[in-house]
Image (cartoon, coloured by chain):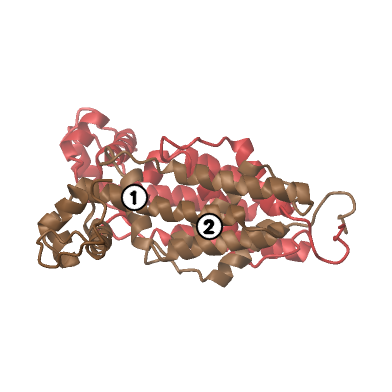
Chain colours: A red, B brown
Amino acid sequence: MSHDPVRSQPLPTFPIEPDEQTRQRLLRAGVHVFDRKGYDAASVREIVERAGVTKPALYYHFQSKEGLLRAILEEGWRQFDATLERAAARPGPTRARLEALGDDLYGLFSGNVPFVRVAHTLFLGPGDTPVPFDLAAFDRSLERTIGRIVQEGLARGDVVRGEPRTVALAFGGILGACAARQLHPPYRAMDPDEFRQVLGLLFDGVLRREIPGENRS
Amino acid sequence: MSHDPVRSQPLPTFPIEPDEQTRQRLLRAGVHVFDRKGYDAASVREIVERAGVTKPALYYHFQSKEGLLRAILEEGWRQFDATLERAAARPGPTRARLEALGDDLYGLFSGNVPFVRVAHTLFLGPGDTPVPFDLAAFDRSLERTIGRIVQEGLARGDVVRGEPRTVALAFGGILGACAARQLHPPYRAMDPDEFRQVLGLLFDGVLRREIPGENRS
């Protein structure tokens, strides 16, 4: 891409700062300012001041405020996708695979609360979104990965019920509820152990089972 | 309260329209305009035009745009709370009680998508909220009701695992995931039957159980 960092040719005195560190500082500053002020009210001046770089550096790397937002969303997508790829490739029993996926996604989410808030506010809020971005693609991708783990679990015999889509919805919902508690200060946040307990209810079921051979009432 | 409707003395020619119908029209119009434009950008003029009433009617019933928002949030809270009260008082097996609560909340949510979007955007978005309102109170209240049903289920014997808080988080997360698919157009919405299936996974568990007497592997 035309705004790729020029890491092999560092030019420290060049005013546009075409290095990867500058790009990363701008991405972090953009998320911070979009989160605090909202995308519309955020100014390029505030973003570059927070990043400690010059305005031309922002235009060099991202062309515009809109380009910066697009890069932030692409980076979020890239990390999410890499997490799912790892989960799909991991071997082992279904419980361990789903727990590891939950831990990874929970960690990714907790480490990027301002990003998640920015994405949600932009795409659930009023008006048109400033850049075309398919928020629902996150869920479709999660559904595909969980679908694969569930299918393999059915073949393996440790999954006893659940369509891939319904399991993905339940899993994603539990992840969302636990993680959402970090988005808004009045909520009591949840630690990773508590999250595992909640996910464990989905694995094991809350109620006494009514199927033959398991009904102990 | 001072802005209570004066239903016993209808005064059709009075310009402030102090009746309940006018109040309800303003509440609906407020939700619609806040949802489409955002609270800050929404004007009193647009709201009264959509409601088909005069500006003085809005000031009579709600004092200000802020007062209208407060009344909208109070009305949402009132309906949510009434749904939980009904669920807590309902007798029967835990599965039926939780399913009925799920159906009721799912129905309440699907019938009020613009309201839910307004509340989320306001309280997750940037800046201070225009009126003090504790969004997390919805979750605490859900937790209390589910906690009561779970405790009664433990006593009854049809709940085999789960702390009240963890069950409430899982239940609320599944409800949220299914309902959120109606908030944003790119998502594929979920019908009540699908929602019941997803909730059923939490009740019965996805994985083969590893506890004595239930392990069939």
| Residue B156 horizontal side relative to residue B24, left or right | right
Residue at the disc numbered 1: B73
Task: Report the residue at 10% width, 67% height from top.
Answer: B13
| Residue A3 horizontal side relative to residue A170, left or right | left
Q: What kind of residue is marked 2? A: Leu
Q: Is residue B129 above or below residue B29?
A: above
Which mark identifies residue A182? none
**Is residue A100 something one can see in this rendering?**
no
Q: What kind of residue is marked 1? A: Leu
Task: Report the residue at 61% width, 49% height from top.
Answer: B146
**Is residue A62 something one can see in this rendering?**
yes
Picture quadrant of residue B89: bottom right
Picture quadrant of residue A104: top right
Provide residue A12's location: percent of width, then percent of height: 24, 28
- Judge by depth and name the residue closer to the eye, B93 or A76: B93
Task: Report the residue at 86% width, 58% height from top.
Answer: A217
Of the 4 image quadrants, the one containing the C terminus of chain B is bottom right
Provide residue A111's location: percent of width, then percent of height: 47, 37
Residue at the disc numbered 2: B175
Task: Report the residue at 33% width, 61% height from top.
Answer: B114
Provide residue B154's location: percent of width, then percent of height: 75, 47
- Crowding at dot 1, Cα within 10 Å, few <14 / some 14-19 / many 20+, comes out as many
**Circle 2 chain:** B
